Image (spheres, rainbow, N blue to C red):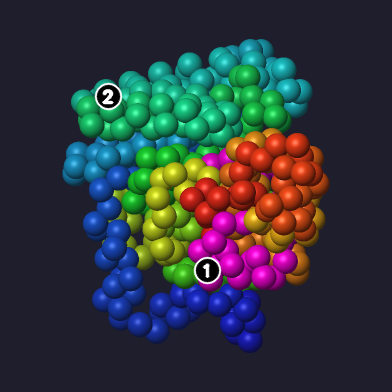
C-alpha cells in the first residue's frame, strides 16, 4: 500500500513501522497479555478443516496449544466452528449442502463427531471439557443469560474447558447469532474474560485484503477501530467459513468497547495462543476502552437493538454530559417495532449512534410521546408507568 494512505488508519502500528524498531520496543506493547487469567479462543472452520473436511492434524495442534495454556493456570473457553464440515461427508453428500434442512442435518451429525474429537484429544492431556450449543435467544433473555453465566463460571471453577458452538441444527434467522466471531464476543463479555483470540486464515488485520494486494501491511496494534478499517475489511476467504474480516472487526468492537482485549491471528501458526500470551509479536492486538459492568455489556452488546430513537441535541447532551435519563421531550423520531424492556439504539439528529438502552414503553407508545412533556404522559396514553423513555441506569453510552 502506498505510504501516503497510512494516516487514514488512525492510531495503528504496522509491520513496516515495527521493522524500524528493536525487538524490545516491538513487544513492549504486548506485555499486558502476560497478565491474562481467562481467555476465550474462537476457531473458525478454515483453521480446523481443509476442502470442507475436518483436518485432524490441525485439530491436534489446536488442542495441544490450548492444553498447554490451561496447564499454566489460565482458564480457557473455546468457541468452535466446524460442525457442518464434520457432518456432511457422513450423510452421503458429495458437496457441502446448500439448503437449510441439509445444513441443519449436517450440523446435527457433525456436532457429535466434532465434540467427540475434542473430548478425545483433551482427555489425552487430562483435561475435562463440556459442550454448549447456544442461540441468540440465550443472550437476549436476561434470565437465561445469567443462568448460562452461572453454569460457565461453575465449570471454570471446577477446572473444565467449556466448548461452545451455535446450535446450527435448530437455529433460524430469528434466533441466530449468525457467525461464531460475534458469538465469541458475546461469550467473552458474558464471562468477562480478559482476552478474546480469534484464530483466522489470515495473519491478522491488514491495511488491505492481502489476497488482493500483496503489498498490504499487517497492523500489529489498534487503539481505535476507524471507518477506514471497516472499509478495508473483506469477505469470507474460504468456502467453509461464514464470517470474513468484517465479522472479526465487529467482534473486536464489541469486546474492546466493553473493556477487554482482542487478538486476531493465524490459526495454523504452531502454538499460536501460547506464544501470544508470552508476548510474541503475532497477529493484530486491539486495545480496550474503559471497562464496563457485566449488566451494561448485556444491554449494549448481547442483544440486537429492536429499533432506534432519534433524539435532539439537547437530549443528547443531557445523556452524555449530564448523566440524565431520556425523557419524552427529547425524542424526535421513532423507528422499528419494539416492546417494553427491549434494547433500543439512540441516534443523534446527524445519524450517529451514541447510546443503547432498555426502553420503558413500546414503539407505538413512544411514537405518541415523542416531543411531549413528562406531565402529559397520562393524558396521552391513559396511564403513566414511567417518567423516562430510557432510565439512566438502563442506558449505555457507546464509544
Q: Which mark is residue 215?
A: none
Q: Quadrant of residue 24?
A: bottom left
Q: Is residue 40 left or right of residue 302?
A: left
| Residue 122 in view (yes/no) | no
> Mark 2: few, some, or many residues within 10 Å (few <14, many ≥20)?
some
Q: Is residue 353 above or below residue 5?
A: above
Q: Is residue 88 above or below residue 160?
A: above
Please name whichever residue, 337 or 87, is drawn nearer the observer in this view of the structure. Answer: 337
Residue visible at 37% across and 40% down in the picture: 191
Please name whichever residue, 301 or 279, is drawn nearer the observer in this view of the structure. Answer: 301
Segment tinted magenta in the rendering: 302-326
**Residue 309 belongs to the span the image colors magenta:** yes
**Residue 117 belongs to the span the image colors magenta:** no
Please name whichever residue, 56 or 188, is drawn nearer the observer in this view of the structure. Answer: 188
Separation of marks 1 and 2 at Cα, in angstroms = 49 Å
Q: Position of residue 322 (x, y in %)?
A: 52, 68
Q: Position of residue 109 (x, y in %)?
A: 56, 15
Q: Which mark is residue 128?
A: 2
Residue visible at 24% across and 57% down in the picture: 35
Q: Which is nearer the N-term, disc 1 or disc 2?
A: 2
Q: Quadrant of residue 31?
A: bottom left
Q: Look at the numbered disc 2 and give the secondary structure of its residue.
A: strand
Q: Is residue 325 left or right of residue 346?
A: left
Q: Position of residue 393 (x, y in %)?
A: 49, 50
Q: Position of residue 2 (x, y in %)?
A: 64, 82
Amino acid at each position: 500500500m502506498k505510504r501516503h494512505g497510512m494516516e487514514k488508519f488512525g492510531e495503528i502500528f504496522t509491520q513496516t513501522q515495527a521493522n524500524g524498531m528493536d525487538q524490545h520496543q516491538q513487544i513492549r506493547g504486548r506485555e499486558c497479555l502476560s497478565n491474562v487469567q481467562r481467555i476465550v479462543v474462537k476457531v473458525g472452520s478454515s483453521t480446523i478443516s481443509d476442502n470442507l473436511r475436518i483436518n485432524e492434524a490441525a485439530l491436534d495442534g489446536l488442542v495441544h496449544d490450548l492444553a498447554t495454556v490451561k496447564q499454566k493456570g489460565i482458564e480457557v473457553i473455546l468457541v468452535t466452528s466446524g460442525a457442518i464440515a464434520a457432518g456432511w461427508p457422513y450423510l452421503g453428500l458429495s458437496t457441502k449442502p446448500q439448503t437449510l434442512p441439509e445444513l441443519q442435518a449436517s450440523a446435527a451429525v457433525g456436532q457429535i463427531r466434532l465434540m467427540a474429537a475434542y473430548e478425545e484429544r483433551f482427555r489425552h492431556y487430562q483435561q475435562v471439557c463440556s459442550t454448549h450449543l447456544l442461540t441468540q435467544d440465550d443472550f437476549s433473555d436476561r434470565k437465561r443469560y445469567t443462568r448460562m453465566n452461572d453454569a460457565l463460571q461453575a465449570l471454570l471453577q471446577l477446572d473444565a474447558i467449556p466448548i461452545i458452538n451455535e446450535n446450527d441444527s435448530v437455529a433460524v434467522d430469528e434466533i441466530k447469532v449468525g457467525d461464531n466471531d460475534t458469538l465469541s464476543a458475546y461469550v467473552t463479555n458474558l464471562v468477562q474474560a480478559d482476552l478474546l483470540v480469534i484464530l483466522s486464515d489470515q495473519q491478522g488485520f491488514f491495511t488491505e485484503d492481502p489476497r488482493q494486494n500483496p503489498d498490504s501491511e499487517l497492523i500489529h496494534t489498534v487503539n481505535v477501530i476507524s471507518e477506514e478499517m471497516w472499509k478495508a475489511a473483506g469477505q469470507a476467504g474460504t468456502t467453509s467459513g461464514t464470517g470474513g474480516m468484517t465479522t472479526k472487526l465487529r467482534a473486536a468492537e464489541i469486546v474492546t468497547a466493553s473493556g477487554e482485549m482482542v487478538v486476531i491471528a493465524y490459526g495454523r501458526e504452531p502454538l499460536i495462543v501460547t506464544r501470544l500470551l508470552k508476548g510474541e509479536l503475532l497477529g493484530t492486538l486491539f486495545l480496550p476502552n474503559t471497562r464496563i459492568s457485566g449488566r451494561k455489556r448485556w444491554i449494549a452488546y448481547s442483544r440486537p437493538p429492536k429499533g432506534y430513537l432519534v433524539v435532539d441535541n439537547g437530549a443528547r447532551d443531557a445523556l452524555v454530559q449530564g448523566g440524565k435519563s431520556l425523557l419524552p421531550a427529547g425524542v424526535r423520531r421513532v423507528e422499528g417495532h419494539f416492546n417494553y424492556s427491549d434494547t433500543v439504539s439512540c441516534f443523534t439528529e446527524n445519524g450517529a449512534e451514541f447510546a443503547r438502552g432498555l426502553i420503558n414503553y413500546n414503539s407505538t407508545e413512544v411514537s405518541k410521546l415523542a416531543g411531549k412533556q413528562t406531565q402529559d404522559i397520562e393524558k396521552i396514553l391513559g396511564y403513566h408507568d414511567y417518567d423516562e423513555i430510557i432510565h439512566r441506569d438502563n442506558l449505555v453510552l457507546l464509544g
